């Protein structure tokens, strides 16, 4: 359930070792959320996330558990919901923060790698989001946060595999939100630009780069106001708003 300040009791973080996901969970813990389930592949890393979330929690009796979840595993969407709904009395707030950037140059020469990036970022994640959404719909309330990216708003040549997966995810999540409008379930799509995390640690920071803390702050503001989507930082929304409408020949001249 949610309190009057829109703070959830129970949170599911899918991508329990994600730098951005953990910052969002920490922000909720600071507000008073007491029950977290972290789902992901790396149990040791998630235990570190659990400790970080517990260390900033302000509510009494905080509990953070970790469960195994691999997006690409067979029927993982089913197992995720089964375990999460056993661990949590209700799934109030679910954050989907899994993702993999891949290596465009290598992946475009490997159909298997291309498939994996599409599955992790979209095709095998979407059923998991839908399953949680249907569960929330039955319970009559819930908030879903989906980590999309500006990369999916106008897909660029330089990362079109990851970008097209995010484009699919973004469209899916936005329309899912529309479909749930009368069910008490809200979907907020978060579209960061370049965020300094372990996903991007090997890359040179892009202009308007931001931090997991800023993404967490913007995410909570967006879910407080029940916004369907948010760009982080907000200025990147203006930039991408222009860029997405540039004629193809002009867009081609922009070196990224
Ligand atoms: N960083 C950026 O610049 C940026 C910009 C826009 C959008 N985003 C999006 O924001 C989200 C969080 O990214 P981040 O920056 O926090 O990166 P991160 O720290 O690398 O987190 C990515 C998460 O995805 C998980 N993951 C990858 N493949 C998985 C699989 N097959 N099954 C289960 N979990 C899997 C990773 O788990 P493991 O620890 O097991 O690998 C990790 O928890 C992602 O959706 C990303 O695409 C990031």
Image (cartoon, helix red, strand yellow):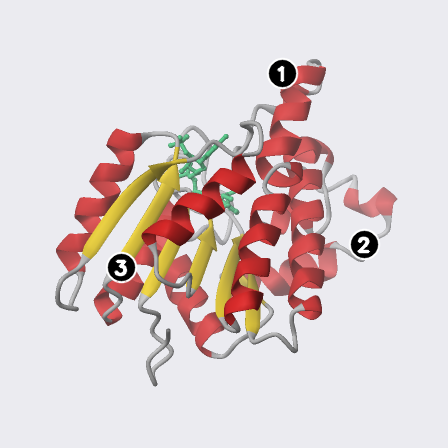
Residue 30 locus on image (x, y percent): 22, 66
| Residue 180 seen from this side | yes
The earlier-in-sequence mark between 1 and 3 is 3
The earlier-in-sequence mark between 3 and 2 is 3
- Label number found at residue 246: 2
Camera-near label (1 vs 2) is 1
Asked if the residue at label 3 sits under 8 Å from ligand 1, the reply is no
- Label number found at residue 106: 1
The image shows residue 90, relative to residue 255, as above or below, that is below
The earlier-in-sequence mark between 1 and 2 is 1
Image quarter in which the C terminus is found? top right
- Disc 1, SS: helix
Q: Give left or right: position of 43 versus 69.
A: left
The image shows residue 113, relative to residue 192, as above or below, that is above
- Residue 205: image quadrant is top left
Task: Provide the residue designation for mark 3.
Answer: 35
Q: Give left or right: position of 59 versus 13.
A: left
- Disc 2, SS: loop
């Amino acid at each position: 359930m949610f309190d009057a300040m829109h703070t959830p009791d129970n949170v599911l973080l899918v991508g329990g070792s994600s730098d951005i996901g953990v910052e969002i969970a920490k922000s909720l813990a600071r507000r008073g959320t007491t029950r977290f389930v972290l789902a992901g592949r790396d149990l040791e890393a998630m235990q570190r996330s659990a400790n970080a979330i517990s260390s900033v929690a302000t509510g009494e009796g905080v509990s953070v558990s970790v469960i195994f979840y691999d997006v690409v595993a067979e029927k993982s969407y089913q197992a995720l919901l089964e375990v999460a709904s056993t661990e949590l009395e209700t799934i109030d707030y679910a954050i989907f923060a899994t993702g993999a950037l891949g290596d465009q140059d290598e992946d475009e020469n490997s159909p298997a790698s291309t498939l994996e990036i599409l599955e992790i970022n979209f095709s095998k994640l979407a059923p998991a989001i839908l399953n949680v959404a249907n569960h929330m719909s039955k319970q009559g309330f819930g908030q879903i946060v989906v980590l999309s990216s500006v990369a999916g708003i106008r897909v660029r040549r330089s990362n079109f595999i990851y970008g097209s997966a995010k484009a699919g995810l973004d469209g899916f999540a936005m329309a899912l939100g529309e479909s749930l409008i009368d069910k008490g379930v809200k979907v907020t799509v978060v579209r960061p630009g370049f965020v300094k995390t372990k996903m991007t640690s090997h890359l040179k920071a892009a202009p308007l780069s931001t931090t997991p803390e800023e993404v967490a702050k913007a995410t909570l503001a967006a879910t407080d106001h029940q916004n369907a989507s948010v760009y982080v930082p907000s200025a990147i929304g203006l930039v991408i708003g222009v860029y997405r409408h540039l004629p193809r020949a002009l867009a081609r001249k922009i070196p990224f």
